[in-house]
Image (spheres, grey):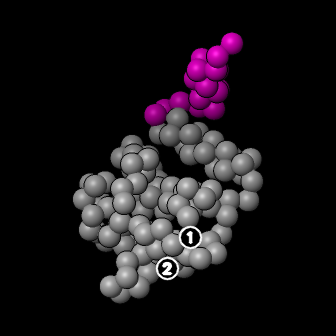
Amino acid sequence: MTLQSVTVDVLDPTPPYEQLRRQLADLVGSGVLAPGDRLPPVRQLAADLGLSPGTVARTYRELEQSGHVRSRRGGGTRVAPHPPTTSTPEQALEEAAHAYLERARVLGLGPAEAAAALDRLTPR
C-alpha cells in the first residue's frame, strides 16, 4: 500500500515524525484508512518519503500508543479495529488552519498575509 497523499515538508518547523503522525492519524480518524488496513513497512515508507527508518518507527509507535494502529512482529502495522475518530470536521479544519498559520510564520508572514492568500484562492 502506498500513501500517496502523505508528505513531509522540510520547511515546516514541525518534526517529520509529528507531521507523519498527524497525517496518518487524520487518515485513520476520517476513515480513509479503515480498520485492518495495513500500513507500509517502516523501511518502505521511510524510503518513499526520504526519511530515516527510525523516524517512521517513532511515528508508528506513537500511533500505536494513541490507539490508531496495532503492530505485530511478522504481521506488520495495521489500523486498529476501533481507532479513534476525528471528532468533527471543524476540529480537523482547525488543526489544518493551525498548521497553515505555522507554515506562514516560517515563511516570515503573519496571519493577515495568510488570510489574504486564502482570499485570493477563494472563487468569487
Magenta stretch, main secondary structure class = helix
Q: Which residues are magenta?
A: 107-124
Location of residue 20 (image quadrant): bottom left
* 17 is higher (above) or lower (below) than 96: below
Find out whether residue 122 is within the magenta segment. yes
Disc 2 crowd rating (10 Å Cα; few below 14, some 14-19, many 20+) is: many
Q: Residue at x 46, y 34 (%)?
A: 107
Q: Amino acid at mark 1?
A: Pro
* 65 is higher (above) or lower (below) than 94: below
Q: Which residue is mark 1?
A: 35
Q: Residue at x 73, y 59 (%)?
A: 87
Residue 99 location (% of width, % of height): 56, 45
106 sits to left or right of 52: right
* 75 is higher (above) or lower (below) than 114: below
Q: Residue at x 35, y 87 (%)?
A: 73
Q: Which residue is mark 2?
A: 70
Disc 1 crowd rating (10 Å Cα; few below 14, some 14-19, many 20+) is: some
Q: Amino acid at mark 2?
A: Arg
